[in-house]
Image: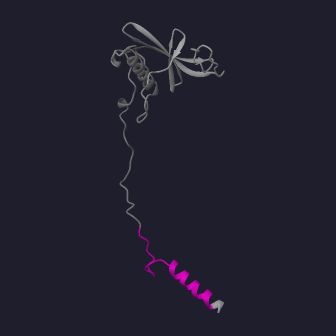
Amino acid sequence: MRYSIFVVVLAVFLAACSPTGAGDNETSYPNTSYPNVGPSTVDLSQITPVANEEGENVVIPPPGQRDSQAKLIHDISLDVSKRSGADISEVTLVKIEEVVWPDHSLGCPAPDVMYAQALVDGFRVVVKLEGKEYTYHTNGLRSFVWCNDGVPVEPVK
């Protein structure tokens, strides 16, 4: 009795696992024909950097990637604009220089605050608005503080 139940269950299982259209051995695949692909031509003049007014090559970020340094300068200019009420287009970049800060104070420690003692890569960014220069210290390209007379001032929200 057990043997006959096993045979019936096995037969049902095998029937359920067989492909539909038994005896049809052809497998259907989607159209896989591709046009002839040959070498392509690239006009390098369209992607070669051009020189700025000082004769230095302008570095252009790869397509689809934002220039993070340009974004940082924009965010700093926006901060100055919000603080002063002036239009952001009136803020000009004076200079940006790479700096390795000695600790997490970014070279602009707040009084009575302890900072992690680790080297921090960043930038010193100087922008100008209406004859006044604003110096910002950054933590890489991530965050910045306005260093006003040696005292950090958090960005305007």
- In the rendered view of the protein, which quadrant contains the C terminus? top left
- Residue 23: give x, y in percent of width and height: 45, 81
Residue at position x 37%, y 37% in the image: 42
| Residue 59 on image: x %, y % | 43, 25
Is residue 86 a member of the stretch shown in magenta?
Answer: no
* Figure disc tally: 0
Residue shown at 58% from the left, 22% from the top: 121
Residue projecting furthest to the top: 131
Choose between 157 and 142: the one closer to the eye: 157
Q: How is the image coloured?
A: one colour
Magenta segment: 4-28
Q: Which residue is outermost to the front? A: 112
The reply to whether the magenta stretch includes residue 6 is yes
Residue 7 placement, left or right of 144: right
Above or below, comparing residue 19 to residue 145 in the picture: below
Using the image as rendered, state which of residue 106 and residue 109 is in the foreground: 109
Quadrant placement of the N terminus? bottom right
Seen at 51% across and 27% down, the residue is 142
Q: Which residue is at a point 44% across and 78% down the rendered structure image?
A: 20
| Residue 13 drawn at (x, y percent) | 55, 81
Image-based side of 86 in relation to 16, left or right: left
**Image quadrant in which you'd find residue 139:** top right
Q: Residue 141: horizontal and vertical position, in percent?
A: 50, 25
Could you tell whether 90 is left or right of 139 in the image?
left
